[in-house]
Image (cartoon, rainbow, N blue to C red):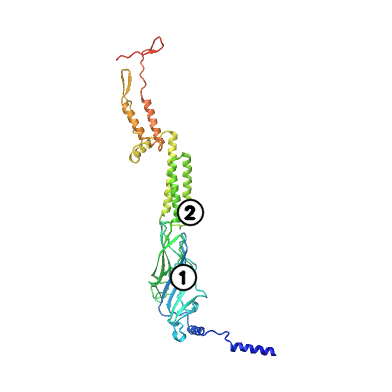
Amino acid sequence: MIKSLAFLILLNYLFYFCDCGTLPAAQVTEQSLITSLLRGYDKTIRPDTTVYVDIYAELQQIVAIDEKQQIMTTSSFISQRWFDDRLNWTASLYGNIRVVMLPVKSLWIPDTMILNSADTSGYLTVSDYSLASVYYTGEVYMILPALAVKTRCNFNVRYFPFDKQVCGISLTSWSQGSNRIQYTENSSEVIDISSYTEHPLWELNGTDMTVDETADRTPFDDDDYDDVITIQLYIQRKPLYFILNGIFACWVLNSVTLLSYTLPFGTQIGLCMTCFMTYSVYSLNFSSLFPQQSQYLMMITLYFLLSIFWTLISMAWFILCNHFTTKAEMPKFLYTFCGLLQKKVFFYCFPSAKDDKKKDVIVNNSELKKSGDQESIQATIIQEKKCASCQKLLPSCFRRNTKVADIEKKDQPSPIEDDTPKKTNNNNFPIIDKPEV
């Protein structure tokens, strides 16, 4: 009995003589203010006939860019500001409280969504912990995180890897037209990039925010258009990675193909086949990064095609030269074409056409002379000097000259033998009678 009485006395002392479970005066005032603001508040009714919503954005990072799927993933914070006259109060009556934090789900908020979203739901995420700042003037300021927003972007990669892209995030009201909600922009506070983190492959050159008009999606609305506010990002690709791992490597292979002209035939074919396969692998790797389209031809693809074509031409040239070198002769039409090519482009290298007519033979004082011997010898010396620089490049040229010289030797008349019988002296030496003049 005594213990029960003592317990009751202690309990009464705690409730009546202590301040346990009570709020300070400032919090009590704020609580009464919030209670009075939300009393009778209907969040399904717009604050005014036309609500003007200002949108601000704080860009944190470009998380990823998928050129093949044409999707850009960004991390940002979207801020919206509007006026609600039902949420204003006199600050002097509530302890000079100017700002209170109210749950977003207890207030009317615009149904802003991302129009070009690539996610299943384009609406900005509103959770139970989302709060809005309400000023005593009735101004409502709400910040919603958009940490991984995926938006569609039309990439033009014709000049890859030196391309520039313009991607945007389009925001608008899904169910209410411009006569109910109008989105405005603040020229002084467009996009905040003070806390932006640079992407390793893309450089942010600038930002912009525009308000466009699109067709009204509400069938029973009197307005003909909706306001769409677009946050534009001007980005440029950093080409160093692709230059070192693609363009420079193919340029080295082009140089190797050019140097293969100084190698033997078997090594030339093997080296060209290796370069050809390497070009094909590089082309397939780069084509897997971009979407399948037939609107334009990429410059990097054209470069790979020219490199493959250059390797095929070199391989065909090596096989052609080896074929003519093995047979030691060149077809007449190809010989004529190469001669014209050397005259017009690579200067004169091939010898001029030889006269197949036999030279007149003059017998004078038992000596055989061929007309134009001095001229032929001088022309041959000059021609050998001209072809000295081409013998390594075109072996068939040198072999052609040798064949022409052999033909000339065959065309020379053999020494004239007289039908008169030979006489021998006592020393068994033949004595040839002098012919009569």
| Rendered image: mark on residue 160 | none
Q: Callout 2: 10 Å neighbours few (<14), some, many (20+)? A: few
Looking at the picture, how far across and down is residue 403, in whole percent?
Answer: 39, 30
Looking at the picture, how far across and down is residue 324, in whole percent?
Answer: 43, 36
Q: Against 302, is 149 above or below?
A: below
The outermost residue toward the left is 437
Quadrant for residue 336, please give it. top left
Q: Specify the quadrant that holds the N terminus.
A: bottom right
> Which residue is at 45% across, 50% downward?
249
> Which residue is at 33% across, 30% downward?
379
Looking at the picture, how far across and down is residue 344, in whole percent?
Answer: 33, 40
> Which residue is at 42% across, 53% downward?
300
Marked residue nearer the N-terminal end (2 or 1): 1
The outermost residue toward the right is 1
Label 2 to label 1: alpha-carbon separation: 36 Å
Looking at the picture, how far across and down is residue 210, in whole percent?
Answer: 39, 69
Name the one closer to the observer, 101 or 415.
101
> Which residue is at 44% across, 37% downward?
323
The residue carrying mark 1 is 77
Specify the amino acid type for callout 2. Answer: Asn
Q: Callout 1: 10 Å neighbours few (<14), some, many (20+)? A: some
Specify the amino acid type for callout 1. Answer: Phe
Badge 2 element:
helix
Quadrant for residue 432, please give it. top left
Q: Specify the quadrant that holds the C terminus.
A: top left
Badge 1 element:
strand
Specify whether residue 175 is in view.
Answer: no
Q: Against 237, is 44 above or below?
A: below
The residue carrying mark 2 is 285
- Left or right: residue 425 versus residue 5 is left
Whether residues under marks 2 and 1 lie with C-beta atoms below 8 angstroms apart, the answer is no
